């Protein structure tokens, strides 16, 4: 049975009242939704809030899922809409400052965690964590519409056509936002490295 067929079976069971099926459906997709949320909000607390809103939205609207697209596509349409709503209601949760503060906390925490992973090079692990924090901070400097396109294209591996459908824009607009975001990220990276 394919993943889509498994999702469909879980959806049918959840709609018939199975709490176990609903729990399995959430567990199958929660990591992707959390990572999506974290990359957009920049901190774990706001990411959890956004993830909760997404799954509440899915729960309330599961009866509307028609199966025209994969469940994951429908799920990320809801996640996309909830992210935009949260960005409008709480713009501070999507700010560069929160990402930078979180990055600083992560670096300090990382030093404390190094003893737990002696088989890996501590300096390489710290360097990777700092690079990831910097990229996340630079993503936070992008307008939300560009961040969403980068998230959907790079991290969710959607095509420009799928992104266009999710955002109710043309594929060309999705491409323009994506490449504009990449140029902006490149400029930010060059600025940070004094190039």
Image: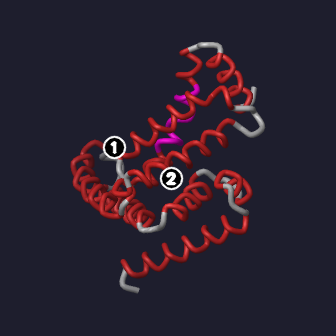
Q: Which mark is residue 176?
A: none
Q: Nearer the viewer, mark 1 or mark 2?
A: 2
Left of 116 or right of it: where is 63?
A: right
Disc marking residue 84: 2
Reply above or below: 171 against 86: below
Q: Secondary structure at mark 1?
A: helix
Q: Which residue is mark 1?
A: 45
Please state the horizontal and vertical placement of residue 153, each as a whole percent of the image: 62, 58
Looking at this rendering, what residue extends furthest in the front direction?
Answer: 89
Residue density around tag 1, few if under 14, some if 14–19, many if 20 or more, within 10 Å? few
The quadrant the N terminus occupies is top right
Q: Earlier in the sequence, mark 1 or mark 2?
A: 1
Q: Magenta stretch?
A: 25-34
Asked if residue 33 lies in the magenta stretch, the reply is yes
* Quadrant (top left, top right, bottom left, bottom right) of the C terminus: bottom left
Seen from the viewer's position, the closer of residues 25 and 92 is 92
- Residue drawn at the location 50% of the way across and 75% of the way down: 184
Asked if the residues shown at circle 1 and circle 2 are in contact, with their CB atoms under 8 angstroms apart, the answer is no
- Determine which quarter of the picture holds residue 117: top left
* Residue at 41% across, 53% down: 41
**Front-most of 18 and 108?**
18
Where does the image place residue 111, in percent across and percent down from the top left?
Answer: 23, 53
């Amino acid at each position: 049975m394919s993943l889509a067929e498994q999702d469909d079976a879980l959806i049918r069971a959840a709609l018939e009242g199975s709490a176990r099926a609903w729990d399995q459906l959430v567990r199958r997709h929660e990591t992707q939704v959390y990572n999506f949320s974290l990359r957009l909000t920049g901190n774990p607390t706001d990411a959890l809030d956004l993830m909760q809103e997404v799954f509440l939205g899915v729960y309330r609207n599961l009866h509307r899922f028609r199966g025209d697209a994969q469940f994951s596509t429908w799920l990320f349409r809801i996640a996309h809409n909830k992210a935009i709503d949260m960005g409008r209601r709480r713009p501070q949760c999507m700010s560069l400052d929160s990402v930078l503060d979180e990055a600083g906390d992560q670096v300090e925490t990382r030093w404390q965690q190094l003893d737990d992973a002696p088989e890996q090079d501590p300096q390489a692990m710290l360097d990777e964590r700092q690079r990831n924090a910097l990229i996340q901070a630079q993503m936070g400097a992008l307008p939300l519409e560009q961040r969403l396109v980068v998230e959907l294209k790079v991290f969710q591996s959607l095509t420009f056509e799928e992104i266009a459908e999710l955002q109710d824009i043309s594929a060309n607009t999705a491409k323009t936002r994506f490449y504009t975001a990449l140029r902006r990220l490149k400029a930010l990276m060059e600025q940070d490295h004094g190039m």
